[in-house]
Image (tube, rainbow, N blue to C red):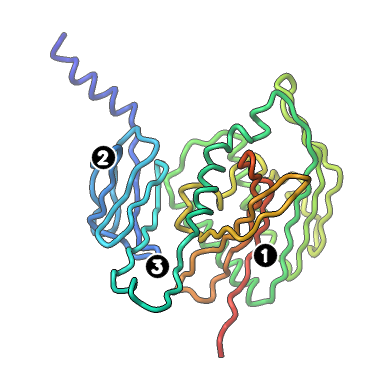
Amino acid sequence: MNKYYPLLLLLFSTLLFSQSKITIKDSETHLPISNATVSCDHTVLGKSNASGILYFTSDCKKVAVSATEYKEASYLTDKVMEVFLVRREPKTKSIEGVVLSDKSDPRALEILQKVNDNYNQNSPQSLESYAYKSYEKIAMDLDQDSIESYNNYIRKRIDSLEKLPQRPMKPKDKKDSLQSVQLAQLAGQSKMFLWERASEVMYSQKYGEKINILDNRVSGLKQPLYELMAFRSNRNKIPKEVKEENRNLYRFFLTDSLEIDGRENYVIRFRQVNNREARDRKKFNGYLYIDKATYALKKSRAKATRPTKGP
């Protein structure tokens, strides 16, 4: 019987640790980075191939990715990962008179890390019961060319998602994902579109969550948008701009502090990383308001703008 123990142990390990796929690219050129090292707790899991891809098996929640001439970065482990490494600046740049650096403010990154660390305990879901009112708004004002570009983007986005490995999803998550796709498709039917919704959210451990829609208004579409009435917002999810794995997708700057509802808040401005190969892409930017005492996310404001073209 003893001779079967190694085989059983190997089978158990295979079931316990799921395989992950990571694609490593340059943050500016979006070209694959070969021979990049992926490690966990100083243990090397492997190196990327010529396509910047590595398949690995690990139970680590985070992995570190490093490559020659690039800054090392850490990312949360997932089944399918796409990460972007930032190049190290040449030493010669340090002696230049004036250098405009495209880097995030270290103070802003430190605050965002504390937001992540305290997110669960600051979430209303950590309470036995809660009640609050929310206001949600989506507004779009597009010219005809922008509508065509937007619809092309949505089609390509859906095609790309369909090619990814399908992961098991809970019925609620599957419904939310489907509604998000429907909303994105319907939003491209009009040049001007405005949706506003006021709701009251109540929760208790005994009865669960209940949402009362106080008002729901849609304008700019020929037909009523019933999908919007049933659309579930991401109010219970950590915003993508705050997630640790998206640090390389945005630049963050601590710009101000102000008082909201009698409490001091940090104001952090963020903007999408410039893509030099696609100058006509829309840029996503906005502000995050973070409570100084608890590091809770008070509110966020974001918008997409098209860069101004030169002569």
- x, y percent for residue 281: 54, 71
Badge 2: few (under 14), some or many (20 or more) residues near its Cα, within 10 Å? Answer: few
In three-dimensional space, the C-alpha distance between marks 3 and 1, rounded to whole angstroms, equals 29 Å
Picture layout, residue 89 above or below residue 254 = below
- Viewport quadrant of the C terminus: bottom right
Query: Looking at the image, is mark 3 or mark 1 nearer the viewer?
Result: 3
- x, y percent for residue 104: 48, 60
**Residue 283 placement: quadrant:** bottom right
Name the mark on residue 188.
1
Query: Looking at the image, which residue is at 80% across and 41% down?
Result: 133
Q: Nearer the viewer, residue 298 or 195?
A: 298
Verify CB contact (< 8 Å) between mark 2 and mark 3.
Answer: no
Q: Name the secondary structure under disc 1.
A: loop
- Viewport quadrant of the N terminus: top left
Query: Looking at the image, is mark 2 or mark 1 nearer the viewer?
Result: 2
Q: Name the secondary structure under disc 3.
A: loop
Query: Looking at the image, which residue is at 61% across and 61% down?
Result: 255
Of the image marks 2 and 1, the number of the one nearer the N terminus: 2
Query: Looking at the image, which residue is at 23% across and 49% down?
Result: 47
Name the residue beneath numbered marker 2. Answer: 42
Of the image marks 3 and 1, the number of the one nearer the N terminus: 3
Amino acid type, mark 2: His
Q: Nearer the viewer, residue 282 or 146?
A: 282
Amino acid type, mark 3: Glu
Name the residue beneath numbered marker 3. Answer: 28
In three-dimensional space, the C-alpha distance between marks 2 and 1, rounded to whole angstroms, equals 47 Å
Q: Nearer the viewer, residue 68 or 145?
A: 68
Amino acid type, mark 1: Gly
Q: Nearer the viewer, residue 232 or 169?
A: 232
**Residue 132 placement: quadrant:** top right
In three-dimensional space, the C-alpha distance between marks 2 and 3, rounded to whole angstroms, equals 27 Å
Q: Name the secondary structure under disc 2.
A: loop
